[in-house]
Amino acid sequence: MNITEHLTALSAGTLIERMGITLVSASADKVVGTMPVAGNTQPAGLLHGGASVVLAETLGSFAAQLHAGEGRSVVGIEVNATHHHGPRDGVVTGVATPVHRGRTTASYEIVIETADGRRVCTARLTCLVLAPQ
């Protein structure tokens, strides 16, 4: 089982699965995932900003976990997001790339775009890297 399949298996029965998030590729340097707009909208029919944050935190957390390595775990300690565009349909793609990867914290920028490249959200996530227990 490769790392993408492993992370996908860990997502079974979680919010990640309920949101329809699909992991496309995963490495410590870049994590890519998609999420449908349908089912993740707010009452006005636009992609819910909270859904974008869930996608961003999911991808950034996976990247931080890969950085932390086996036997260590990570928890998000800060997330912020700027919403640029609210799509009404289709699928959005998020890409998490590292800003800082240290011994105790790791921060990622997550850019979410529509299929035609329109930026939906720019987020930043910082995770605490926990010592093995």
Image: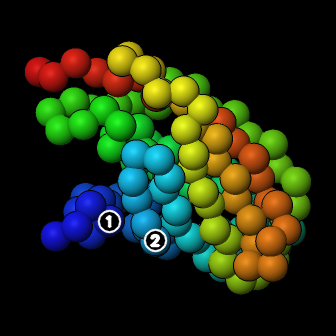
Number of dots carrying numbers? 2
Q: Quadrant of residue 88?
A: bottom right
Circle 1 residue = 4
In the image, residue 69 above or below residue 94: above
Res 23 visible: yes
Work out which residue is located at the far front of the displayed protein and give it: 29
Q: Is residue 31 left or right of residue 70?
A: right
Picture coordinates of residue 115, whole percent (x, y): 74, 79
The residue wearing badge 2 is: 24
Locate residue 35, reporting x and y percent.
Answer: 58, 71
Amino acid type, residue under disc 2 in the picture: Val
Choose between 133 and 107: the one closer to the eye. Answer: 107
Q: Residues within 10 Å of mark 1 (few under 14, many from 20)?
A: some
Can the viewer see residue 9 in this picture? no
Q: Earlier in the sequence, mark 1 or mark 2?
A: 1
Give the quadrant of residue 41. bottom right
Q: Residue at x 46, y 71 (%)?
A: 24
How is the protein colored in the picture? rainbow
Work out which quarter of the rendered image holds the C terminus and state it. Answer: top left
**Pointers 1 and 2 in contact (CB under 8 A)?**
yes
Other residues around mark 2 within 10 Å, as few (<14) / some (14–19) / many (≥20): some
Q: Is residue 104 above or below residue 91?
A: above
Q: Eyeballing the image, is 87 above or below 85?
A: below
Mark 1 to mark 2: distance in Å? 7 Å
Quadrant holding the N terminus: bottom left
Answer with left or right where residue 131 lies relative to residue 91: left
The mark found on residue 28 in the picture is none
Image side of residue 83 versus residue 130, left or right:
right
